[in-house]
Image (cartoon, grey):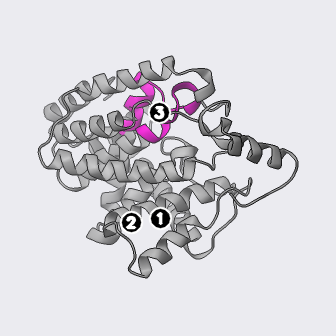
Amino acid sequence: MDFKNASELLALCTQQQLPISEIMRRRECELGESTRDEVTHRMTHALEIMRASAMTPLKTPVKSMGGLIGGEAKKLAQHDAKGRSICGDVLHRAAQYAMAVLEVNASMGLIVAAPTAGSAGVLPGMLFALQDCYKISDERLIDALFNAGAIGYLAMRNATVAGAVGGCQAEIGTASAMAAGALVALHGGSGAQIGHAVAMALKNLLGLVCDPVAGLVEVPCVKRNVIGAVNAVSAADMALAGIESRIPVDEVIDAMGEVGRRLPVELKETALGGLAATPTGERVKRDLQGGTQAAY
């Protein structure tokens, strides 16, 4: 039960009268020669890791290896607790959870790459925010992860999810698309609506460069995870409202791959351009090379 693109995936859903999550679950069983229980157990374990990485820094912040981030998620949570947030509950919680996961990643903690370590906060950020606000069960979140996995697989197969190959659009863009599709599924959207949400989320971030300051997955990565989560919510909401992407999802994925190939090497994780090449970015790099950890 394999598929090469979104068109084939949605055709399978129609033919089998099954949601994307179930198609992906069965694919994993077949290709991995695993039972349904084994596949579900692995995804349950992934969800548990995601939850720990999203929640722990809110109570116990950890400084990153480079010293550039640490404690931002807790600050955001405290800001909300004081009633000062200008975002709604879903967006604010998604933002703080997304930042928390990146703090864990940057301090060499355990995370789930979704699809990469540098974009690992987007999907859990959105999922746990939704669970908080809509009382969604873990079983449904696991289904959502299979849905998201199918989307990530399509991006990886037909384009790339690596910042070193396609820029940050490939990492945060794909993560946001995965989250948008999962969100639509959790709200009972159709396969077609999931496709539109994925397309809109990905094309909203088309061309985003990968320019990590000092070559570390810290700045601007932690804030871009927030943008990925917020973008996912807005794309999902548009799709659920009946708004469609004029460019089909498969063509958007192909375009992302083409844009990635055209990006200069300086903007693909080399820390030679963008924010990494600013005066402050260069100074941070020198300080870290000299053994100095300053607050940036």
Count of numbered badges drawn on the protein: 3
Q: Secondary structure at mark 2?
A: helix
* x 62%, y 54%: residue: 105
Q: Looking at numbered disc 2 in the image, what kind of residue is underneath it?
A: His
Report the residue marked by disc 2: 92
Question: Residue 248, how many percent across, how many down?
Answer: 23, 26
Nearer to me, 214 or 283 = 283
For marks 2 and 3, the one nearer the N-term is 2
For disc 2, the neighbor class at 10 Å (few under 14, some 14 to 19, many from 20) is many
What range of the chain is rendered magenta?
Answer: 150-173
Q: Quadrant of the C terminus?
A: bottom right
Report the residue marked by disc 3: 170
Q: Looking at numbered disc 3 in the image, what kind of residue is underneath it?
A: Ala
Q: Looking at numbered disc 1 in the image, what kind of residue is underneath it?
A: Gln
For the residues marked 2 and 3, what is the alpha-carbon distance in whole angstroms?
Answer: 24 Å
Q: Are marks 1 and 2 in contact (CB under 8 Å)?
A: yes
